[in-house]
Image: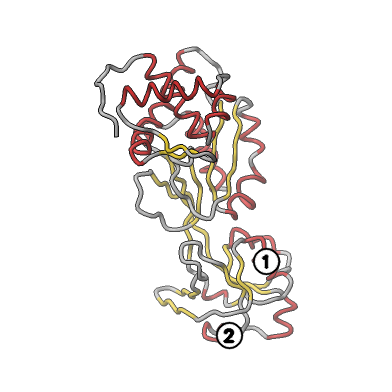
Amino acid sequence: MKKSRSRGFDRHSLDGLGVLRAVVQAGSFVRAGEALGLTQSAVSRAVARLEDRVGVRMFRRTARSISLTEEGLRFYESVAPHLAAIEDATIEAGGSSTKVRGRLRVNVDGSIGQFVLTPRLEPFLAQHPDLSVEIAVRDRMGDLVRDGFDVSVRFGIPEPSALKSRLLMRTRIVTCASPAYVARHGMPRRPSDIEKHPCILMRDPSTGSHFGWEFVRGKKVVPVNASGQLMVNGVGPLLAACLAGQGIAQLLELYTRELLADGRLVQVLPEWAEETYPLYAYHHSAQLMSAKVRAFLDFVVALTRE
């Protein structure tokens, strides 16, 4: 680590912070320069000046990639929310009629991206024409700051994190099969019967194995040893296999409501379907929340209440 020269914070430092954010978001000095209208050498000099003022080496550089150093990551995590707040304050002070603008990067799991957000995003985009939205599907949330994301929307219990989490909804877990499957194999009558049937399993990205199955009625919880030859890592393949009659599957009611209503799927053991799964939004400090993140969260809250 460099020894800090203890210089005061000035305009050049602020300019360097903007360049730093552009490099982190773009993933390279060249692409950051293209976004900022600067040459690669100008970007490199701005980062070097910032490193000199702060006394921290920001990036590891190799022939093929760059990445934040441990000290650089800690520094960027501290300043990134403030940069967003400064950007919003500048827009507001300038009297702009459209405060929600720029690029919003959203980290989601595959099911949220495919079934919840992208099919219903048009009204939000129409309301904010100066905003562009990037939906990135990831197995795990990872580090929002280091990966350059503004917000995340994901199913599951929150992991320990400095991020703020907001519960959006809970949806039931339902067990389903196709009518053709039930005609061939019969309908399970009790949770233990599931162990005699081929099940379509969903991979748990945190363990590499499949999610465990259990059935809930009131205070009674019955775990079962679900097994089968097919394991998938996405809701789309899970639904497709279930609809094709390849086995019994456990899915979120959010994704099966229409399929159950029109008879393409039938619910298995409906009296044992009281288990729920939470949907959370994750973001940085509420005090430093940018206008675009606030608008997106308001949109997602309204969407999940429908």
214 lies left or right of 5 = right
Q: Can residue 149 be seen by looking at this rendering?
A: no
What residue is disc 1 on?
Answer: 260
Furthest toward the front, the residue is 63
Vertical comparison of 145 with 37: above or below: below
Q: Colour scheme in the image?
A: secondary structure
Q: Quadrant of residue 124?
A: top right
Q: Residue visible at 64% across and 66% down?
A: 238
Horizontal arrangement in the rendering, residue 158 relative to residue 6 (left or right): right
| Type of amino acid at the residue the image marks with label 2 | Arg
Specify the label residue 18 is tagged with: none
Residue at image coords 57%, 74%: 270
- Frontmost residue, 185 versus 39: 39
x, y (%) of residue 225? 50, 81
- Please tell me whether mark 1 sits on a helix, a strand or a loop: helix
| Residue 165 % position (x, y) | 40, 47
Residue 268 appears anywhere in the view: yes
Residue at 37% x, 30% y: name it.
Answer: 79
Q: On the rendered image, what quadrant is the N terminus found in?
A: top left
Q: Mark 2 Cα within 10 Å, few/some/many (few <14, many 20+)?
A: few
Three-letter code for the amino acid on which mark 1 is drawn: Leu
Q: Is residue 294 left or right of residue 54?
A: right
- Read off the residue under disc 2: 189
User: In front here: 75 or 89?
Assistant: 75
